[in-house]
Image (tube, rainbow, N blue to C red):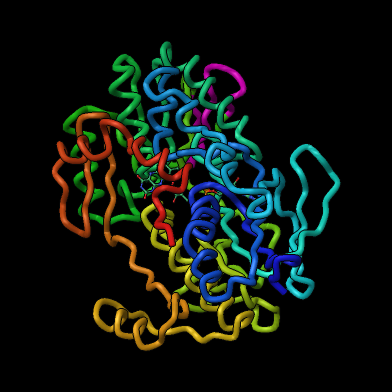
Amino acid sequence: MATAATPYEIVIIGANFAGLGVAHYLIRKTIPELQKLDESKSFHITVVTPNTDMFFKIAAPRVLLNATAIPESKVLRPLSEGLSKYKPEQLTLTQARATGHDAAKRTVTITPVGSEASKDLHYDSLFIATGTTSASPLWTLHADQSLTSTAFKSLHAALPTAKTVYIAGGGAVGLETAGEIATTYPNAKVTLLSGGTSLLPRISPAVGARAESYVKSNSVAELVHNLRVVSSDTSKSPNTVTLSDGSTREVDLCIDATGGKANSQFLQADWLDETGRVLTRDAYFRVKGNGSDDVEGVYVVGDIVAGSNNTAIEVDAMVPTAASAFAVDFARKVIGVSAEPAKSGLLASLFGMFAGKKAGPPSLVEYKPMKDTILVPIGPGGGVGQLMGWKVPSFFVGKLKGQKFLMELVEPALSGDKWPKA
Ligand SMILES: Cc1cc2nc3c(=O)[nH]c(=O)nc-3n(C[C@H](O)[C@H](O)[C@H](O)COP(=O)(O)OP(=O)(O)OC[C@H]3O[C@@H](n4cnc5c(N)ncnc54)[C@H](O)[C@@H]3O)c2cc1C
């Protein structure tokens, strides 16, 4: 196994923030380090995903405004721009969905986009990075990226003349969208339905209360609590919206900014938590399975991880940790080398000197995401947020995120330059 003739096959399912990050990280860092341990080993990665573009969804609340604020072409970027520099013997990008999985045979069933014909793909190691799908394609990729593009264009056409806009969802996405629309289209009356008793319920009551006071004092939107949008007919204008109290409203536009459902339908149910996310068996993103399935060499990364807070901040910390688990497992199972506890500084150089090796055994990277950190711009000039639990002043939220919507992060994510090299 894993000779030049028979490379070790790694399959990554899903290629947006998490899957793309794992692909780059393995090729830039993990694989070269393993090859320093044993140069006879070779690896091949297959990335399976229905989208051909990376979607930098973080900027979606501004992209939806019009064709120029942030052009769609800057947030939907061909994955090939980042991945085609790798040789075919290193990586293959396959436009398909995972539609089944057989743990005993170690195969994933994949169905190419636009085809009914599925086939089984063998893996030695598997990374599951399939994220979530929101009801609206404005926030996540649905099938390939064309539905997201259509959704942007339809709002570009409708927003300039919309007088009444309902936004369903009081999380960061709904709040940011309300702020963007209210700023660019001041003639529109924006109504934000939190669907609960407060804004930003998944973050903290203090930040939620600050957001509520910001929305009110800046007349961003009419805020309605304890009322949900049950359904909306957006096929004709005006949209007919049915609310949880049984009433209906006619509005020019209704935007669904509620959360997403986990993309795990291709996995067995006993690998999942009650929300459909994949359970882990340790803090290094090794998949737990059901106790009897073969889950050796199977990892999960990104929003699909059980207990994830669905942030890119967490994804950025998960990628090195899951890759380190893969390296440790591979070194033990395939090369026969045991993991070393993490070393640093003098100890590491002394170990290197006495061991006389070019490279030591891999060690696990602890998962340390930046905690209690979120920035929620409500319009370009300000908003609410916290950095490691500390309150961020409104103008700083505007400077850090509201002005450019973190667009400076697109290029390094696509190219892989955000990740270290071996
Ligand atoms: C509007 C918005 C703003 C945000 N702002 C921030 C922010 O400011 N800071 C922050 O930290 N986080 C933010 N986030 C969250 C962040 O974007 C997510 O945490 C991140 O995108 C998760 O990445 P992922 O790769 O796990 O999932 P996704 O981005 O959902 O990608 C999943 C991938 O899997 C593919 N896939 C799905 N099903 C299958 C299948 N069956 N087979 C194969 N492939 C499949 C999809 O096509 C896609 O390529 C924001 C999210 C949104 C929507």
Tell whether position 236 is magenta. yes
Does any portion of residue 230 appear in the rendered image?
no
Q: Nearer the viewer, residue 352 or 277?
A: 352
Position of residue 404 relative to residue 400, above or below, is above
Q: Nearer the viewer, residue 173 or 289?
A: 289
Q: Nearer the viewer, residue 177 or 311?
A: 311
> Residue 165 appears at what percent x and percent y?
41, 24
Where does the magenta region start and end? 233-249
Residue found 20% across the figure and 36% down from its top = 399
- Quadrant where the image shows the N terminus: bottom right
Does any portion of residue 30 appear in the rendered image?
yes
> Residue 87 appears at what percent x and percent y?
63, 48
> Residue 3 appears at what percent x and percent y?
70, 70
Residue found 44% across the figure and 26% down from its top = 64
- Quadrant where the image shows the C terminus: bottom left
Tell whether position 65 is magenta. no
Position of residue 328 relative to residue 133, above or below, is below
Relative to residue 241, is residue 386 drawn left or right?
A: left
Residue found 76% across the figure and 68% down from its top = 102
Relative to residue 222, is residue 253 drawn left or right?
A: right
User: Where is residue 210, by image quadrant?
Assistant: top left
* Count of numbered badges drawn on the protein: 0
Relative to residue 379, is residue 318 drawn left or right?
A: right
Residue found 34% across the figure and 31% down from its top = 178
